[in-house]
Image (spheres, rainbow, N blue to C red):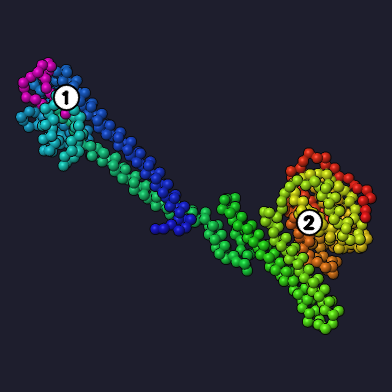
Amino acid sequence: MRLRTVRSRILAAMLALAAIALVLSGGIAYGLQRSALLSDIDATLQRHASEFEMLAESGTDPLTATEFATAEELVTAAMKLTVPTNNEGMLGLREGRGPLVPGQDSALRLQDDAQLLAVLGEQMAQDEITITTITTSTARYRVMIAPVVQDQRGTATSAPRAAFVVAIDRDAHLAEFNEVARTYAIVAAIALALTAVIGWIVAGRLLHPIRTLSATARKVSEEDLSGRIAAEGDTDLADVAQTFNEMLDRLETAFTARHALLDDVSHELRTPLTVVRGHLELMDPSDQDDVETTRQVALDEVDRMDRLVTDLSTLATADSPDFIQMELVDIGTLTDDVYDKVRQWTSHQWRVTERSDTVMSADPQRLTQAWLQLCANAAKFSDPDSTIEIGSRTLDGQVTLWVKDHGRGIAPEDIPIVTERFARAGVTRQVEGAGLGLSIVDAIAQRHGGYVAIESELGAGTIVHLHLPIAGQQDVAEQYYPVAEDVL
């Protein structure tokens, strides 16, 4: 069966590990215990062999205190002195005659197994005590065979041979242990089954946030991004749910901004197109002055659309890796360059009132673009011939580029929104522009790790600060100072 779900795979992995652990632990325990039992069998037989050797060396029957006259007497005495345990039997072998059987009844009657007797008859010809395994159709025996080849005084005899035999039914001896092993296998199988049931339930509870996440993801669309997942606790899955919710927040913000952007772009482009269409429809082709006027209006509106598209392109690429090209920038030189550019623009009086000599890592082209945009805004909303101040300073690990005008100012309620795309404060709606300038400045500041701050008062003017954290600062004297009377 193909495992399709994370829940199934987790359960399968868990059961596989549990099964491997049970099999390994059970198998190792079974092998060690079985080996110990087999060693006990051999130890028992070895003990019987040692006792028989001691009896033969003594040459005297301890029960009657008489010396052994024949090998048969030695074997008979050994059988009387040996008490067989469970699954253990004994008998005596006599050359040319039937076996000697013990007087007491034992659980294992070796004399009843004809195959065993035949093999023992062949083994009796050996001269040394042997411990061996004999398998018959009845059982598998571990056997000790102790032949008697000398008389009680250690002198070779021509009397018939005899042998003392002790055998243990190995399978019967292991039967109880094997039953325990089978019980362990059954219990292990039941434990695995219970583990599977409990594991399925536990995995389901643990993965509930994942299923909720999947269901929420399937419901999410461009039209509905409101779905969220309840992130409870401090588990990894709760972190996943929280991260997913944050992603949905960003998506919702992005889609909302995109819709707003499309609406605003549609509106901003429709206005110049409407103006051009209206003039073209009303133009008198035979009137040269009317044609020239319409042409100039059309060119102005085309320029306006071109600026709009350029600004939108700048904002669209603001998040790309190559939007800024970092290099070492001398802020003092940058301040001078911006001043040289803006003083040629308008009839305003431009003045540099602070100048920082910090060298930092930044994109000089983008900083110039942002600073000139702030200057353009200041000029646009200030009276002709009024003073506009620019400057740069270094303080608390930040470089600040700023522009101060004495123009119309911005209402307090409009300050938070003027950096949004197409946002225009109430007092500036009659001024030409798409409302993208401060958005571009804000994007450039953010790509440098900084931000834009605005201080303004209606009728008193505005100060816009571009705050930039210093990165890659060199060992250059950081100083800022007023530049006196640097006025057009």
Q: Name the residue under label 2.
A: 369
Q: In which quarter of the image is residue 359?
A: top right
Dot 2: element: helix
Residue range in magenta is 145-162
> Does 159 appear in magenta?
yes
Q: Where is residue 325 in the image (x, y as percent from the top left)?
A: 71, 51
Q: Along the polypeptide, which appears first: circle 2 or circle 1?
A: 1
Percent coordinates x, y for residue 398 in the rendering: 79, 46
Quick check: 53 above or below 187?
above
Residue 2 as seen in the image, left or right of residue 390: left
Q: Which mark is residue 128?
A: 1
Instruction: Give the residue at x 27% y 31%.
Output: 40
Secondary structure of the residue carrying tag 1 is loop
Q: Single out the mark in the foreground, 2 or 1.
A: 2
Residue 46: x, y in percent? 23, 27
Amino acid type at circle 1 is Glu
Crowding at label 1, few (<14), some or many (≥20) Cα neighbours within 10 Å? few
- Measured in 3D between alpha carbons, the distance from the residue under mark 2 to the one under mark 1, in whole angstroms, is 109 Å
Left or right of 412? Residue 386 is right
For residue 388: magenta?
no
Residue 395 in sight from this viewpoint: no
Q: State yes or no: discs 2 and 1 in contact (Cβ < 8 Å).
A: no
Instruction: Point out residue 481 in the picture as x, y percentages from the top left corner.
Output: 88, 45
Q: Which residue is drawn at 85% across and 42% down?
A: 479
Q: Nearer the viewer, residue 481 or 418?
A: 481
Q: Quadrant of residue 133?
A: top left
